[in-house]
Image (cartoon, rainbow, N blue to C red):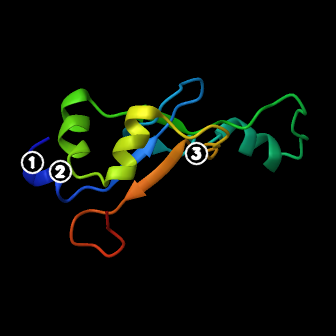
Amino acid sequence: MTELRAKHRRITLVQAPGTTRPVIGHAEPPSDDLRGRTLAQSGVPASPRREPAGALVEGDDLRSRTVLSHRLPSPWRRVLAEGLPGGARVAADGVVASLPPEGEPGQGD
């Protein structure tokens, strides 16, 4: 990713289940559950053992994370370096925080 493209990209801190620190990455919503939807439409009750699919959480490649990390406000850099404060919970979708692209409202240090 070039520096120019990095300025026009939303930066998202994500944390995958089972990891201790967030990284710059992205979270995709769970894929469409075709089997579950088909069973529901045919009137078959859902299994109580069936767990809902979670979001797919992935860190960006190292080069992209390095370039994008230079745009982060100081508190976000601290979270990347040290992890979340004790007791902090990560949302079910894995997103810790999101920073809009440069030039959009809501960006600050």
* Residue at 31% over, 34% down: 60
| Residue toward you, 1 or 42 | 1
Left or right of 65? Residue 47 is: right
The residues tagged by marks 2 and 3 sit, at their Cα atoms, a distance apart of 23 Å
Q: For the image shown, how many numbered marks are present on the structure?
A: 3
The circle on residue 93 is: 3
Q: Is residue 79 left or right of residue 85?
A: left
Closer-to-camera residue (35/94): 94
- From the viewer's perspective, tell me whether residue 41 is left or right of residue 47: left
How far across and down, in percent of the image, does residue 104 sit?
Answer: 28, 73
Element assignment for label 3:
loop
Residue topped by disc 1: 3
Q: CA distance from mark 1 to mark 3?
A: 28 Å
Examine the rendering and report whether any part of residue 26 can be seen.
no
Q: Amino acid at mark 3?
A: Asp
Query: Residue 39 appears in which quarter of the rendering?
Result: top right
Q: Amino acid at mark 1?
A: Glu
How far from the left and from the top, in percent, is residue 42?
Answer: 83, 45
* Element on which disc 2 rests: helix
What's the residue type where badge 2 is placed? Answer: Ala
Earlier along the polypeptide chain: callout 2 or callout 3?
Answer: 2
Do labels 2 and 1 touch, CB within 8 Å?
A: yes
Residue located 38% across and 48% down the image: 76
Q: Is residue 86 above or below residue 11?
A: above
User: Among all residues in the image, which is located at the extreme bottom?
Assistant: 105
Query: Percent position (x, y) of residue 90?
Result: 60, 43
